[in-house]
Image: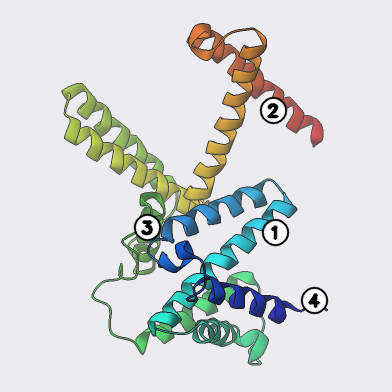
Amino acid sequence: MPDAPGAFARLLAIIQRLRGPDGCPWDREQSPRTLRASLIEEAWECVSAIDNADDPNTEEELGDLYLLVTMMAWMKEQEGTFTVESALTHIADKLVRRHPHVFGGAARGNAEQVLVQWDAIKAQEKTSRAVPASSLDGVPASFPPLEKAAKLQKKAAKAGFDWPGPEPVWDKIDEELGELRSALQAGAPVEIEAELGDLLFSVVNLSRLLEVDPALALHRTNVKFERRFREVERRLAEEGATPVEAGLVRMDALWNQVKAEESDAQNTSK
């Protein structure tokens, strides 16, 4: 059996050395705050590797995440805030506590029932803490806007403030589109930004009610756009033209060609 504890101990020892008096000057200057952006970047790179079914890259990206998370925990231990051990113990205890059907002899249910049980146990845990001032408490201020919109909506939904289903949200999206068009016609920049934000918020609501993660959905579309545009550029290069020289009509024709070829390939593989 692989020695996972030994591998983690080695990683922690390396991090301790890097952060030590005789360690790396750059690593010693870092803090959890300076590594925040790297944590988000590595998480998305890991998502990309998973989406591409690229196991070697997934292994590497997960390792990068282990590095950042372990280094941040060690930084906190150096500060005297908490220890690496306490962070690991905390999550291990929480997993055992929230899985009584595995560790506590409770009745086993299906995935949906287990999720309801998880939320109930989580709610009980929170009753022992300070009473939140709002149902929206706990949403990080530093969340990217798209993820924050989804999190705020989930919090509000658990408090009972939610649409009955996805159908009414379609009407809300149409309403927000109309208001955005009116703002555009009025030439009001502030209102345009506000209405566009409302439209995006409504689309996130629809995504949530359709049980689709909006950030992952947008990430997938970003990857698709990049793949297709790069292919358009490649084909233009074969023709001896740059995108600017080719113009929109030619690029659009190539785009549709690439899109059709991808669709045909997907249908053939089914």
Report the Cα–Cα distance between label 2 and label 3. 35 Å
Front in this rendered view, residue 214 or 38: 38
Q: Which residue is mark 1?
A: 59
Amino acid type assigned to the residue bearing label 4 in the image: Pro
Tags 4 and 2 touching, CB below 8 Å? no
Q: Residues within 10 Å of mark 4 (few under 14, many from 20)?
A: few
Question: Where on the picture, by quarter, is residue 64?
Answer: bottom right
Tell me which numbered mark, 1 or 3, is placed earlier along the sequence.
1
Residue where numbered disc 3 is placed? 143
Tell me which numbered mark, 2 or 3, is placed earlier along the sequence. 3
* Label 3 SS: loop
> Where's residue 131, x and y in %?
27, 83
Q: Earlier in the sequence, mark 4 or mark 2?
A: 4
Quarter of the image containing the N terminus?
bottom right
Q: How far apart, in angstroms, are the residues tagged by discs 4 and 2?
A: 43 Å
Q: Residue furthest front?
A: 22
| Marks 3 and 4 in Cβ contact (< 8 Å) | no
Q: How far across and how far down the image is residue 176, in percent?
A: 30, 37
Q: Is residue 127 above or below residue 217?
A: below
Label 2: few (<14), some (14–19) or many (≥20) C-alpha neighbours in 10 Å:
few
Label 4: which residue?
Answer: 2
For marks 3 and 4, the one nearer the N-term is 4
Residue type highlighted by circle 3 = Phe
Provide the residue designation for mark 2: 263
> Which one is earlier in the sequence, the residue at label 1 or at label 2?
1
At 42% from the left and 78% from the top, the residue drawn is 76
Residue type at mark 2: give it.
Ser
- Please name the residue shown 54% across and 12% down the image: 242
Crowdedness near tag 3: few (<14), some (14–19) or many (≥20) residues, C-alpha within 10 Å? few
Are dots 1 and 4 in contact, CB under 8 Å? no
Answer left or right for 105 relative to 128: right
